[in-house]
Amino acid sequence: MDSLITAAARALSLGDPLGALNRVALREDAPALALRGIAMAQLGEFARAKVLLRRAARTFGPKEAVARARCVVAEAEIALVSRDLGWPAKALDAARKMLEAHGERANAAHARYLEIRRLVLTGHLDEAERMLVELAPARLPPALRTIHELAVAGIAMRRLRSKAARAALARAARAVRHAGIPALAAEVENASLVLNTPVARLIVRGEERILMLDEVEALTGSRVLVVDACRHVVRDAHAVVSLARRPVLFALARALGEAWPADVARGALVAQAFRAKGADESHRARLRVEMGRLRTLLRTLAGVCATKRGFALVPRRAREVVVLARPVEGKHAAVLAFLADGESWSSSALAIALGASPRTVQRALDSLAAAGKVQSFGRGRARRWTTPPVPGFATTLLLPAPLPSD
């Protein structure tokens, strides 16, 4: 490898894409094309970066399989950052195995971290955690140790483990000081801000207040029954009942939770759960059926009792019933939560992340665009959607919730 290639690679490893381009911008050999592609990616020119990396992969000779594998890993990182979740994961796995076979542990670990970050982004926390356990970050360069701790913190925050998240971010801050990469340091700082930003609203007896992540964690371990509108579950300190795929039942549970200890009139329940303006006999019959289903699902946590004018929630072990709500609510809030990370998303990537059909997501985006809440750029498969972050709020608790099917 000649001196210019070595110097450009060192500049990229330190987060200096302009320094790298100054050395290889006019060269067309395969290593230079690869480095130019990575430099353009660091500058945010993802489309140009992908073109350069694919040219480099084609230009490398048949005996340079490791170099081609590095190009695949770089393209996979661009796909992740640009939220192209449809990028073939098998290609990344094959590249990682090639790098491991040739002793490139750092690059192979980087490929594994890309897989983990994609799993965290799409809410597959168990699998991401299992992969993290298999890695040994102590033997990795500072930049990869930083990425490892960011992944640990991301999982901890989504599992409502604020102490573990703070410890991981502290380790990430120490590692990134040794790495000396400004962009990575900014990522650590942004992740740390989440722990000091409101993540949810608490509704108790008709009153509301905002909560931080550690307050939410404390709430889930206390002697209260929580109707969690962030994840569409009902929980106490001993058990969790998911209603994520039962939107009508969750709407009923939330209405009862917000009214506790009072009951809720049948007409109000019909309006909230069925979106009906008036309650006729068919609505009341359906309400009885749905309340029976809710009573069966929540039997270990609470009773659903009929009253003279409606229904009431009666906790079995908990002393109090509270509702944990998203900081900002409204129609298509789950789509807005993903877009609020500041990145540009394709509709297909949103569908993968939300576990919803592409048509459902596209209708949501069209509705939000008509309301002026999101913007799009590009056409066809290159079309991307974005929106400014919601000021003053974090979106950690919003991400795992799937879209209710239409």
Image: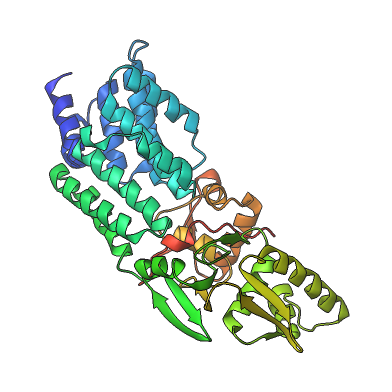
Q: Nearer the viewer, residue 118 or 145?
A: 145
Q: What quarter of the picture does the N terminus occupy?
A: top left
- Residue 315 appears in view: yes
Q: Is residue 134 above or below residue 331?
A: above
- Residue 241 at x, y percent in the picture: 60, 61
Residue at image coords 76%, 78%: 276
Closest to the observer: 65 or 272? Answer: 272
Left or right, residue 286 beside residue 356: right
The furthest residue to the front:
317
Q: Residue at x 51, y 65 (%)?
A: 230
Residue at (50%, 33%) from the top-left corner?
88
Of residues 307 and 149, which is closer to you in this image? 307
How many discs mark residues in the rendered view?
Answer: 0
Vertical comparison of 164 with 29: above or below: below
Residue 56 in view of the camera: no
Of residues 279 and 33, the one nearer the viewer is 279
Tell me the residue at 15%/26% (across/down). Answer: 6
Q: Quadrant of residue 341?
A: bottom left
In the rendered view, tell whether residue 304 sits above or below residue 113: below
User: Is 304 left or right of 157, judged from the image as shown?
Assistant: right
State the image quarter where residue 370 is shown: bottom right
Task: Identify the image quadrant of the C terminus.
Answer: bottom right
Q: Position of residue 86 (x, y in %)?
A: 52, 40
